[in-house]
Amino acid sequence: MAKGYWVSVYPAISDPESLTAYNKLARQAVQAGGGRTLSRGARVVAHEAGITQRVVLVEFDSFEQAVATYESEAYQKALVALPDGVERDFRIVEGID
């Protein structure tokens, strides 16, 4: 079974401290859904039209698990806490089996 991944790129974060509430709720939802955070944008080398800002990569045992966690009540509560000053490109992708 192919793994599932959440890939989030943040082109703009006007107030990084305001992400605290979202991060706490999102972390709990991801853990409850069986996700594992592989990277939280510690270092990025961007090429072509790449973005050097924050990148978050979360791995799930399956694509279906990744989708279900996003759709979960716990993660939907986290999204409500996502600050207005945050621009984000979020994708759920299927890994290669």
Image: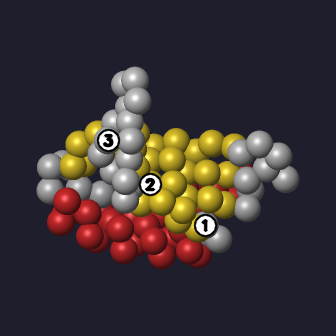
Identified by mark 1, the residue type is Gly
Viewer-nearest of labels 1 and 3?
Answer: 3
What residue is rendered at 82% in x and 46% in y? 97
Q: Report the Cα–Cα distance between label 1 and label 3.
A: 24 Å
Please determine whether, in this image, residue 83 is positioned above or below residue 24: above
The answer to whether mark 2 and mark 1 are in CB contact below 8 A is no
Residue designated by label 2: 56
What residue is rendered at 34% in x and 36% in y? 51
Residue 52, labelled with which disc?
3
Mark 2 burial class by Cα count in 10 Å: few <14, some 14-19, many 20+: some
Please determine whether, in this image, residue 3 is positioned above or below residue 91: below
Identified by mark 3, the residue type is Thr
Q: Position of residue 35 (x, y in %)?
A: 60, 67
What residue is rendered at 61% in x and 51% in y? 5
Residue 35, labelled with which disc?
1
The answer to which image quadrant residue 15 occupies is bottom left
Residue 76 visible to an observer of this rendering:
no
Please determine whether, in this image, residue 42 is positioned above or below residue 74: above
Q: Residue furthest top?
A: 48
Q: Report the Cα–Cα distance between label 3 and label 2.
A: 12 Å
Q: Earlier in the sequence, mark 1 or mark 3?
A: 1
Residue 30 visible to an observer of this rendering:
yes
